[in-house]
Amino acid sequence: GAVVSQHPSRVICKSGTSVKIECRSLDFQATTMFWYRQFPKQSLMLMATSNEGSKATYEQGVEKDKFLINHASLTLSTLTVTSAHPEDSSFYICSARVRRQASSYNSPLHFGNGTRLTVT
Amino acid sequence: QKEVEQDPGPLSVPEGAIVSLNCTYSNSAFQYFMWYRQYSRKGPELLMYTYSSGNKEDGRFTAQVDKSSKYISLFIRDSQPSDSATYLCAMTAGNNRKLIWGLGTSLAVNP
């Protein structure tokens, strides 16, 4: 259980275009999903917290107009990188907690397989 | 000082060896501790999840938490080449607080 599916796994786009990445919880509901960015040989950097039915919460230094997050349902969150530039090239990973009857705040995160974005 | 310190390695061991991976932390409020395994170009996969101090065992994996020393460990017994990956520790104080991540330790198990 607790499978998170992320699509696409790889995308190459030209500078100035926008790219959408989807994150789905396949066998559970996720009121909250998290978007991370990972540079080579570095740890995960939290970009934003995606809340179903409300606005995302962005971490300091992350441009909300550049990284648009939509969490339209309990099983789907999307990250759109707008007007992509080469410096946006990175590995983007989404994650989610299993929503249980009690608070899920302390449940561990389950991750998608990531999206490698290359902007040329 | 980083909140979580983890030696990035790389660590190279022969097949069958016992592997010890460690993280230290500075925030005494951390109560929930996780170990994730990440293969190249994949997302992290949850291996172990522990609350407070103590040991937890799952197959060849054992997680230890020593809150008095602010030190957590992951032991892998009878290591296999398929264990070759990056191992990340993560922890949180709970109550919807952010996860704080270690840098990850790169492990290579040689046949």
Image (spheres, rainbow, N blue to C red):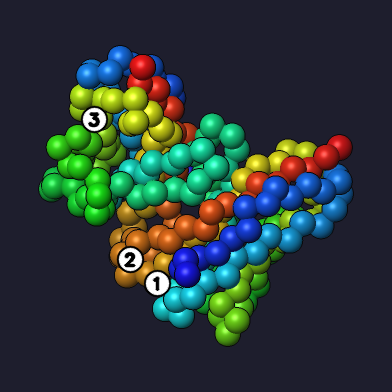
B54 and A28: which is toward the camera: B54
Residue at x 34%, y 31% (from the top left corner): A87
Residue B86 against residue B19 in the figure, above or below:
above
Q: Is residue B87 left or right of residue A8?
A: right
Residue at x 42%, y 52% (from the top left corner): A109
Q: Position of residue A12 (x, y in %)?
A: 38, 17
- What secondary structure is marked by label 3? strand
Can residue B51 be seen in this snapshot? no
- What secondary structure is marked by label 1? loop
Q: Is residue B66 left or right of residue A81?
A: right
- Chain bearing mark 3: A
The numbered disc on residue B93 is 1
Can residue B90 be seen in this snapshot? yes
Residue A74 against residue B51 in the figure, above or below:
above
Residue at x 20%, y 42% (from the top left corner): A63
- Which residue bears the numbered disc 2? B97
- What type is the residue that disc 3 sits on? Thr
Which of the 4 quarters of the picture holds residue A5?
Answer: top left
**Mark 2 surroundings: few (<14), some (14-19) or many (≥20) residues within 10 A:** few
- What type is the residue that disc 2 sits on? Arg
Quarter of the picture containing the C terminus of chain A is top left
Specify whether disc 2 shares its chain with disc 1.
Answer: yes
Residue B7 against residue A28 in the figure, above or below:
below
Q: Position of residue B51 (x, y in %)?
A: 51, 72
- What type is the residue that disc 1 sits on? Ala
Q: Are marks 1 and 3 in contact (CB under 8 Å)?
A: no
- Chain bearing mark 1: B
Real-space Cα separation, disc 1 to disc 3, in angstroms: 30 Å
Residue at x 66%, y 47% (from the top left corner): B106
Q: Are marks 2 and 1 in contact (CB under 8 Å)?
A: yes
Q: Is residue A96 left or right of residue B110?
A: left
